Image (spheres, grey):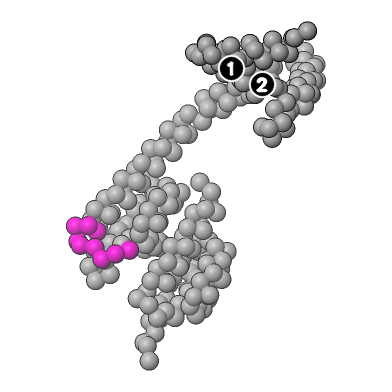
């Protein structure tokens, strides 16, 4: 039985737009189990990942990418 | 600037002062590198600072991680300079673009502030509308179909004639043939 690697990302509301995080969750939930919760000034994203954290890293990148695009520089 | 290299994770963590580089500048730098590496941002415990974690998509040596950070810092500086230059030149750019637009529509320069400015503005607005309507009419008149085979302007025929003239000049026999064809047409 493959050991599942749980990764928790704490994404600051000041740096990661909440809507963008939710969009990223929606997209990545097709690939992994994801749970999202708000903890004060952070959004905690729990990713149950079989792989070596690659999905969580890509998720964080994607959430940041969407946030930057929203900023529309 | 303190920097922490985590060889196990192939990552480098450092702090960026938001007094020097605004959040937008940091975002711009992240945008440049986001497809080449993993980037994670966090708010620092220190005031006015953002923690940046860069992680390679492949295993990296310590000096490669330092290089990664150096490139990121360079890009921060690059973005900052570009923003400053852009702000400084913004008014000039607006004037240039405005002038180009005005020239394209054939508008005369508006008179500097005067008592008649309102009336003149009204007249200029009417002139602008008339100029735009005239341009549209012209465009409608010269609009041709996209199908090149339709050849509405008869360009192909002109090209063919010129080609035949050129060939006749090079080949006398061809020229004779063409003349024969012409004479056959004219036979009584």
What's the residue at 48%, 34% (across, down)?
A: B87
Query: Which quadrant would the C terminus of chain B be assigned to in this image?
Result: top right
Q: Which residues are magenta?
A: B57-65
Front-lying residue, B70 or B142: B142
Asked whether, in this view, residue A66 is left or right of residue B160, the answer is: left
- The vertical placement of B62 against A69, above or below, is below
What's the residue at 49%, 68% (across, down)?
A: A41
**Of marks 2 and 1, which one's residue comes earlier in the chain?**
2
Q: Mark 2 belongs to which subunit?
A: B
The answer, for residue B102, to whether it is visible in the render is no
Q: Callout 1: few (<14), some (14-19), or many (20+) C-alpha neighbours within 10 Å?
A: some
What's the residue at 26%, 66% (across, down)?
A: B59
Could you tell me residue B148's position as x and y percent? Answer: 66, 32
- Give the SS element for disc 2: helix
Separation of marks 2 and 1 at Cα, in angstroms: 11 Å
Q: Specify the farthest residue to the top.
A: B188
Q: Callout 2: few (<14), some (14-19), or many (20+) C-alpha neighbours within 10 Å?
A: few
Could you tell me residue B72's position as x and y percent? Answer: 32, 51
Badge 2 and badge 1 in a common chain: yes
Q: Mark 1 belongs to which subunit?
A: B
State yes or no: discs 2 and 1 in contact (Cβ < 8 Å).
no
- The vertical placement of A4 against B76, above or below, is below
What's the residue at 38%, 77% (across, down)?
A: A51
The answer, for residue A73, to whether it is visible in the render is yes
Q: Which residue is mark 2?
A: B157
- The vertical placement of A73 against A63, above or below, is above
Q: Which residue is mark 1?
A: B164
């Amino acid at each position: 039985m493959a050991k599942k690697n749980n990764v928790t990302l704490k994404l600051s509301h000041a740096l990661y737009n909440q809507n963008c995080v939710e969009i990223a969750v929606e997209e990545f939930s097709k690939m992994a189990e994801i749970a999202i919760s708000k903890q004060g000034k952070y959004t905690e994203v729990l990713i149950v990942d079989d792989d070596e954290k690659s999905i969580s890293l890509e998720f964080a990148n994607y959430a940041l990418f969407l946030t930057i695009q929203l900023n529309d520089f | 600037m303190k920097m922490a290299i985590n060889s196990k994770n192939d990552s480098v963590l450092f702090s960026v002062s938001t007094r020097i580089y605004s959040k937008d500048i940091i975002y711009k730098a992240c945008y440049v590198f986001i497809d080449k590496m993993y980037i994670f941002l966090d708010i620092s415990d220190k005031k006015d600072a953002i923690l940046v974690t860069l992680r390679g998509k492949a295993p990296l040596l310590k000096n490669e991680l330092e290089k990664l950070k150096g490139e990121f810092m360079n890009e921060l500086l690059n973005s900052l300079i570009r923003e400053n230059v852009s702000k400084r030149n913004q008014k000039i750019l607006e004037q240039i673009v405005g002038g180009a637009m005005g020239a394209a529509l054939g508008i005369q320069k508006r008179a500097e502030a005067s008592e008649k400015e309102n009336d003149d503005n009204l007249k200029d607005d009417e002139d602008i509308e008339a100029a735009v309507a005239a341009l549209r009419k012209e465009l409608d008149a010269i609009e041709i179909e996209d199908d090149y085979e339709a050849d509405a302007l008869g360009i192909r025929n002109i090209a063919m004639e010129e080609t035949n003239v050129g060939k006749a000049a090079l080949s006398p026999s061809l020229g004779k043939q063409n003349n024969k064809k012409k004479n056959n047409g004219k036979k009584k």
